[in-house]
Image (cartoon, rainbow, N blue to C red):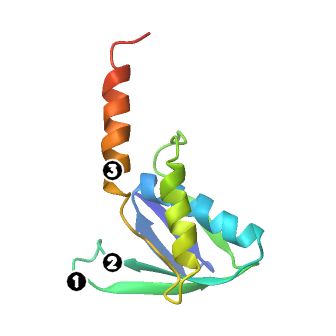
């Protein structure tokens, strides 16, 4: 489980796979000097709540990953996150689109046993 720390006062927990995609999507928006809301469902405390923060250029963000290896990213998922930031609701943490998960699983299975 990785963390996104915002302004040294708020720590949000995400699995490393999701956090890696958020890091890139947020980086794209900040590179363009665009501000937006980031919203997510609280899965860790079990109450089904949600949270939202305002991301802006210069906002102190710290991404901490549990795994030391960087994953191969799903560009379609990053694109979907970036597009969601352009809506009135802002960037919404969403699960990886299902067809992409199936495709990646198929590709990984096809590579098992190959050298």
State the residue position of label 1. 47
Q: Which residue is mark 3?
A: 99
- Left or right, residue 46 beside residue 29: left
Residues at marks 2 and 1 touching, judged by CB atoms closer than 8 Å: yes
Q: Confirm or deny contact between disc 3 and disc 2 (CB under 8 A).
A: no
| Residue at the image position 31 percent from the left and 33 percent from the top | 106
Image position of 59 (left or right of 91): right
Q: Who comes first in sequence, dot 2 or dot 1? A: 2
- Residue labelled with disc 2: 42
Image: 78 above or below 82: above
Mark 1 Cα within 10 Å, few/some/many (few <14, many 20+)? few
Disc with the residue nearer the chain's start (1 vs 3): 1
Q: CA distance from mark 2 to mark 1?
A: 7 Å
Q: Position of residue 27 (x, y in %)?
A: 67, 64
**Residue in the foreground of this view, choosing between 6 and 106:** 106
**Residue at the bottom extreme, as displayed:** 88
**Residue 86, label in figure:** none
Q: Nearer the viewer, mark 3 or mark 2?
A: 3
Name the residue nearer the viewer: 22 or 89.
89
The image position of residue 90, as x and y in percent, is: 53, 83
Sequence-earlier tag: 3 or 2: 2
* Place of residue 79 in the rendered image (x, y in percent of width and height, measured from the top left): 55, 61
Q: How many marks?
A: 3
């Amino acid at each position: 489980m990785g963390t996104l720390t915002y302004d040294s006062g708020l720590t949000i927990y995400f699995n490393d796979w999701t956090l890696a995609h958020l890091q890139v999507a947020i980086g794209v928006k900040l590179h363009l000097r665009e501000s937006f809301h980031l919203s997510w469902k609280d899965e860790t405390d079990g109450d089904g709540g949600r949270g939202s923060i305002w991301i802006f250029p210069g906002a102190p963000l710290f991404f901490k990953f549990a795994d030391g290896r960087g994953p191969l990213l799903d560009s379609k998922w990053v694109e979907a996150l970036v597009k969601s930031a352009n809506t009135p609701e802002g960037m919404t943490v969403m699960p990886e689109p299902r067809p992409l998960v199936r495709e990646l699983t198929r590709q990984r299975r096809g590579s098992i046993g190959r050298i």
